[in-house]
């Protein structure tokens, strides 16, 4: 299934992408599964999702936890804890 | 209930007057302005750059305003948040709430700021003499949020 993935702030700088279209394998259904799948891309990605830093996720502009389910055509975003205001 | 995410500066006085003068049933206006400090974590700050998630930012701020309106008897609210590169003394954010009496407006204004700090997708990057660095989220902001849990 196809999804769009966005990266922000220090995560965008680490992975060197701001946005990409991904055609996910059928078994990748949750944020946790997506993080684990992206970790296979290499050291930078593995370090990002190894649990030592907090990576927040949003699906279609709503903050979600890692158990949230991904559906086709979703816009998934990964970013660090927010620091506005 | 207004939200604006913008690069441009804003005239706080004009914005507050507009909000206040909209109705004679308004008896109280409470506002908060955040501005860029010159020192953070012991280092002199040259610039502060704010990145955000266009689309999600606006919907997150609107959701925070709606939650405030559901919890307190407020008549209107305004959030203006700047993005882009700012300097010390520049305004970052304006939150304003109007209500019939002050208690509701004080509480709602603080609530909106506490939620904005922890829920709205903005990220700050500081430029110091030593280079650029991302600002880390503060535990004190998470603690401030807890006071509003129902």
Image (spheres, helix red, strand yellow):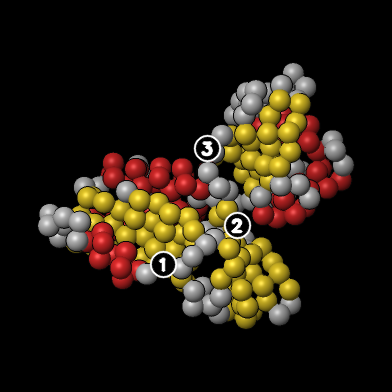
Residue B134 lies, with reference to residue B68, above or below; the image says below
Give the residue at mark 2: B51
Percent x, y of residue B126: 64, 69
Residue B93 lies, with reference to residue A9, above or below; the image says below
Chain hosting mark 3:
A
Percent x, y of residue B42: 62, 79
Q: CA distance from mark 1 to mark 2?
A: 18 Å
Q: Is residue B120 left or right of residue A10?
A: left
Residue at horizontal 16 percent and vertical 55 percent from the top = B23
Residue at horizontal 71 percent and vertical 69 percent from the top = B132
Q: Please name whichever residue, B78 or B149, is drawn nearer the observer in this view of the structure.
A: B78
Whether label 2 touches label 3, CB < 8 Å:
no
Quarter of the figure with residue B17: bottom left
Mark 1 vs mark 2: which is more N-terminal?
1
Question: Which numbered disc, 3 or 1, marks the residue closer to the eye?
Answer: 1
Residue B132 lies, with reference to residue B1, above or below; the image says below
Q: Is residue B42 visible?
A: no
Q: Please name whichever residue, A50 or B95, is drawn nearer the observer in this view of the structure.
A: B95
Q: Is residue B36 visible?
A: yes
Give the residue at mark 1: B10
Chain hosting mark 1:
B
Task: Kindly indicate whether the residues beneath marks 3 and 1 are on one polypeptide chain.
Answer: no
Give the residue at mark 3: A62
Q: CA distance from mark 3 to mark 1?
A: 28 Å
Percent x, y of residue A53: 70, 50
């Amino acid at each position: 299934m196809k999804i769009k993935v966005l990266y922000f702030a220090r995560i965008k700088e680490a992975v060197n992408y701001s946005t990409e279209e991904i055609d996910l394998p059928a078994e990748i259904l949750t944020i946790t599964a997506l993080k684990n799948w992206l970790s296979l891309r290499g050291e930078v990605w593995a370090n990002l999702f190894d649990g030592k830093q907090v990576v927040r996720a949003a699906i279609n502009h709503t903050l979600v936890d890692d158990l949230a389910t991904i559906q086709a055509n979703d816009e998934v975003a990964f970013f660090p804890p927010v620091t506005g205001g | 209930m207004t939200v604006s995410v913008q690069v441009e500066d804003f005239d706080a006085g004009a914005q507050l007057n507009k909000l206040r003068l909209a109705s004679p049933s308004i008896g109280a206006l409470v506002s908060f302005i955040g501005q860029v400090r010159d020192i953070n974590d012991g280092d002199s700050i040259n610039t502060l750059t704010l990145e955000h998630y266009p689309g999600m930012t606006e919907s997150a701020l609107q959701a925070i305003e709606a939650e405030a309106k559901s919890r307190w008897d407020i008549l209107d609210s305004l959030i203006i948040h700047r993005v882009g590169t700012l300097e010390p003394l520049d305004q970052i954010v304006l939150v304003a709430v109007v209500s019939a009496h002050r208690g509701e407006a004080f509480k709602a204004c603080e609530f909106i700021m506490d939620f904005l700090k922890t829920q709205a997708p903005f990220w700050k990057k500081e430029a110091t003499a030593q280079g650029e660095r991302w600002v880390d989220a503060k535990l004190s902001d998470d603690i401030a949020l807890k006071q509003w849990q129902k």
